[in-house]
Image (cartoon, rainbow, N blue to C red):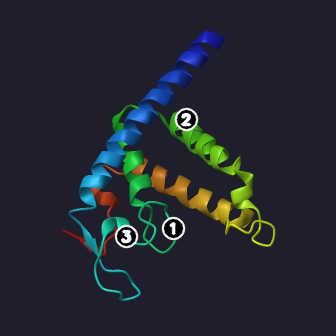
Amino acid sequence: MLVEALKQTYDCYQKMQTAKQVAEAWFNAAERIYTCCPKNGTGKVLLRAYPGCETGDKNSTYGVLHCVLGVSARKQGVGTVCINAANVLWEYKEFRTIFEWLPPEINKSGGKGFEGWLRDTKDDIESVNRGYFTDRKEDCIPASCHR
């Protein structure tokens, strides 16, 4: 039983690694195609420069790269348990770099603080899961971005 669980865990890891590579390759190509118009009226910017396109920040519709990762994961055959476990483990790995998340009065390097980490984690997981239930990578592009 333990051996089977380890096999499934490794299979999940491999599929998520492949999905990540596919998502990054697609995003790197898309960033040269799409231009976006930020809400603050700063003119047109490339997709990568659009606020939050990689991170899921609230300044954009949602994180394009995370959404595309979700689309790619489902196409790689990743199940819902795997995608959620991978999300949680990734965010835990980020949390372990605790000095980045300490409040600014303690961490002079400009970390987000614990509350910032929680908001970012929620946004990231929502973006990946939104993508998981999206059929096309192109549907991850914010409405204010065009070819």
- Residue situated in front as seen by the camera: 122 or 53: 53
In the image, which disc is placed on residue 122?
none
In the image, 79: left or right of 41? right
How many labels sit on residues?
A: 3
**Residue of label 1:** 57
In the image, 147: left or right of 27? left
Rendered residue at 38%/34% (across/down): 18
> Disc 3 to disc 2, how far (Cα)?
32 Å
> Disc 1 to disc 3, how far (Cα)?
12 Å
The picture places residue 51, in percent across and down from the top left corner, at: 43, 72
Q: Secondary structure at mark 1?
A: loop
Rendered residue at 67%/69% (across/down): 110
Please tell me how crowded label 1 is: few (under 14), some (14-19), or many (20+) other residues with Cα within 10 Å.
some
Earlier residue among tags 1 and 3? 3
Residue type indicated by callout 1:
Asp
Q: Secondary structure at mark 3?
A: helix
Q: Secondary structure at mark 2?
A: helix
Q: As displayed, is residue 146 above or below residue 137? A: below
